[in-house]
């Protein structure tokens, strides 16, 4: 559960049984994802002291489809975050490998000069090929062909 900011007292004039202003908290359970509820400001499910345990839903009940969509989106977000962690780790590994290869090239060039091989070696850095224009042309071609087929049929 994540704590939201407590709304102003003009909007929520009610207090819990402890006589403190109510807190608005979001539920992230599978049954009520993203649904807000009012609770005691001292509510904390992780510890035994939970204030006065006041509880009242702030939002209306969700429809089944809303609940399903929110749960799917939460799952998608978790999967994307995990994917991003993996990609960052791979990128870090590749950057480290690139650094080692550059150092190795420099050492080989120095060794080559010490051995008397005074050949000019030029290291050319390459960047990944941008395939965006090619992909765009393929998509346009497929769209045009589909349109032609529909017109002919």
Image: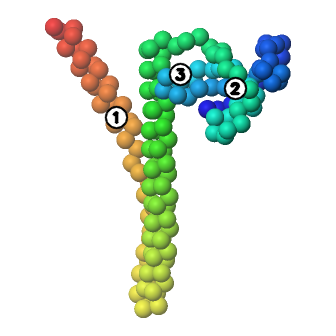
* Residue 114 place in picture, x, y as percent: 47, 91
Location of the N terminus (image quadrant): top right
Which of the marked residues, 3 or 2, is nearer the chain's N terminus? 3
**Which residue corresponds to mark 1?**
135
Residue annotated with mark 3: 32
Check disc 3: other Cα within 10 Å, few if <14, some if 14-19, many if 20+.
some
Question: Could you tell whether 149 is left or right of 14 in the image?
Answer: left
Can the viewer see residue 8?
Answer: no
Please state, as top left, top right, bottom left or bottom right, where the C terminus lies in the image: top left
Q: Is residue 26 left or right of residue 69?
A: right
Precedes in sequence: disc 3 or disc 1: 3
Q: Residue at x 44, y 81 (%)?
A: 108
Q: Residue at x 59, y 11 (%)?
A: 60
Crowd band around label 1 with a 10 angstrom C-alpha radius: few (<14), some (14–19), many (20+)? few
Height in image: 104 above or below 85? below
Tell whether label 1 touches label 3 (CB within 8 Å).
no
**Between 5 and 106, the one nearer to me in the picture:** 5
Q: Which residue is mark 2?
A: 53
Q: Farthest left residue?
A: 153
């Amino acid at each position: 559960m994540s704590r939201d900011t407590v709304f102003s007292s003009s909007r929520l004039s009610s207090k819990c049984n402890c006589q403190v202003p109510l807190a608005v908290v979001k539920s992230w359970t599978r049954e009520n994802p993203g649904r807000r509820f009012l609770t005691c400001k001292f509510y904390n499910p992780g510890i035994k002291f939970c204030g006065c345990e006041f509880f009242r839903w702030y939002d209306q009940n969700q429809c089944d489809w809303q609940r399903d969509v929110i749960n799917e989106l939460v799952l998608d977000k978790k999967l994307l975050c995990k994917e991003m962690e993996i990609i960052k780790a791979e990128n870090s590994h590749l950057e480290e490998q690139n650094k080692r290869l550059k150092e190795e090239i420099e050492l080989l060039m120095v060794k080559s000069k010490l051995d008397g091989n005074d050949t000019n070696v030029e290291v050319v850095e390459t960047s990944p090929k941008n395939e965006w224009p090619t992909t765009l042309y393929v998509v346009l071609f497929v769209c045009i062909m589909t349109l032609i087929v529909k017109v002919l049929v």
